[in-house]
Amino acid sequence: MFPRLSFDHAWVLALGLVAKGTLVFAGPCDIYSSGGTPCVAAHSTTRALYSSFTGALYQIKRGSDGATTTISPLSAGGVANAAAQDTFCANTTCLITIIYDQSGRGNHLTQAPPGGFSGPDTNGYDNLASAIGAPVTLNGQKAYGVFISPGTGYRNNAVSGTATGDAAEGMYAVLDGTHYNDACCFDYGNAETSSTDTGNGHMEAIYFGDNTVWGTGAGSGPWVMADLENGLFSGLSPGNNAADPSVSYRFLSTIVKGESNQWAIRGGNAASGSLSTYYSGARPSASGYNPMSKEGAIILGIGGDNSHGAQGTFYEGVMTSGYPSDATENSVQANIVAAKYAAASLTSGPALSVGSSISLRATTSGYTTRYIAHTGSTVNTQVVTSSSSTTLKQQASWTVRTGLGNSACYSFESVDTPGSYIRHNNFGLLLNANDGTKQFHEDATFCPQSGLSGQGNSIRSWSYPTRYFRHYNNILYVASNGGVDTFDATASFNADVTWVVSTGFA
């Protein structure tokens, strides 16, 4: 699996532990342990983080019957068994319900409860992530990351062994450096046990995004910073640190660590090369951050008070006891690079051809003469036949374009209103003119997959991969399978989100 290497000290730590003359491939937590700063939490949906780990990586729940199953590595220390997930989730939707802690301390991440900010769930909980939103390969083997849309989050407030007060700790996370926004706060790390803001210095978490309310780095972002509560810090003060670069690696290694009156931010390309140090020095000079008052809860995708407006993608991460050395982290980085993260296809099913004109026919019984069309800005279904008016045929025809927000997926431009695209807004589908913004581009990007009902295509939102094109009372929405809105009803969901693609009427 790995190339032949000259095993200097760093690579021995990064790739293997020599025992009785045998090279045993190590995981990141083996490396941290060898460095004297063992993992107290280890989370990944893509691979085992210990060489001997064979337990469950994560749990998924399917929409068809509510059944759950766990996904484990293919072998000890190996990549997740994505094929088991694909089989379990065939012809239905699946959500990630638990991300298990591999450290043995039971610090599992589950659906984040309501806090200072209530979640979008009817009970105030955050949403759960789609199990298929972030496909990747590791050394050629398929796996899935955790795609966090706004409103999605995971948490554990009843933890064991994580740092509290001013105690030393380290953490790293591998993220998608192209998936971010400026909302608060896409974090992984140490937070309040009450899910509320309890004051300065009560958090210590990795942050990634381009929020400019508190700290910033060089350029326009996104940046790796630290969420220390009531501030995103790039360095000594809440202001600008020109040594903290804008980074957008497809796979991004991020590190935050802290001890008494000392902390650091590091980062690098998770697919190649070494780490850089963006800040290392004294704690922020503002009141409340020296000494720190960390509480030890663990969060993913949200802020300490459950602020849940951010987006991002998480593949793996750990928290340690003690302040890791740069040398240990460098060896962890070498291990991550050796895992060979690579992007995988976001689409499946009948292929679409960029530049072609298509029409999309409903497959629900009783609605099979209806096609996706528009009336003004409203996207709806209408009965269209060969004898329909030229105007209606044009309204029911769409030009396939490369995805405005992600080139691995597609956008759909109106044939009769060039420059206007189908986009989602408040989970309704609209036809709007492209305003050139990042938000519009992401809202107008969709990823077709094999139809959930067994024919044609189902078309999911790239930015909200739990949500699919669905007709409900002949109006189009991006709907989830069993969400809080009426158009999320589970009845006839698979049929309502499945479309037969044909050559466009116009």
Image (tube, grey):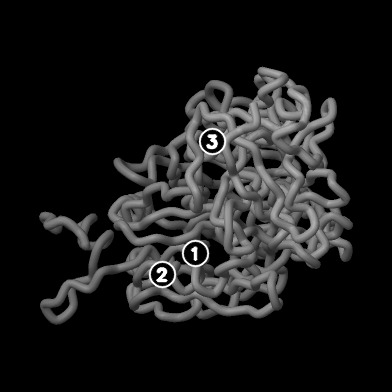
Neighbor class of circle 1 (other Cα within 10 Å; few <14, some 14-19, many 20+) is many
Q: Earlier in the sequence, mark 2 or mark 3?
A: 2
Gap in Å between the C-alphas at discs 2 and 1? 7 Å
Q: Are marks 2 and 1 in contact (CB under 8 Å)?
A: yes
Residue located 34% across and 64% down the image = 31
Gap in Å between the C-alphas at discs 2 and 3? 29 Å
Q: Are marks 3 and 1 in contact (CB under 8 Å)?
A: no
Gap in Å between the C-alphas at discs 3 and 1? 24 Å
Q: Position of residue 317 (x, y in %)?
A: 50, 59
In this image, 27 relative to 374: left or right? Answer: left
The numbered disc on residue 172 is none
The numbered disc on residue 44 is 1
Return the residue found at the far front. Answer: 387
Identify the image quadrant of the C terminus: top right
Q: Secondary structure at mark 2?
A: loop
Observer-nearest residue: 220 or 62?
62
What is the three-letter code of the residue carrying label 2?
Answer: Ala
What is the three-letter code of the residue carrying label 3?
Answer: Asn
Q: Position of residue 460 (x, y in %)?
A: 64, 49
Query: Which corner quadrant of the image does residue 466 belong to?
Result: bottom right
Residue that numbered label 3 is attached to: 406
What is the three-letter code of the residue carrying label 1?
Answer: Ser
Neighbor class of circle 2 (other Cα within 10 Å; few <14, some 14-19, many 20+) is many
Q: Are marks 2 and 3 in contact (CB under 8 Å)?
A: no
Q: Position of residue 267 (x, y in %)?
A: 44, 41
Tell us which disc is closer to us: 3 or 1: 3
In this image, 408 relative to 109: left or right? Answer: left
Q: Secondary structure at mark 3?
A: loop
Q: Secondary structure at mark 1?
A: strand
The numbered disc on residue 48 is 2
> Is residue 456 at all visible to an observer of this figure?
yes
Observer-nearest residue: 397 or 466?
397
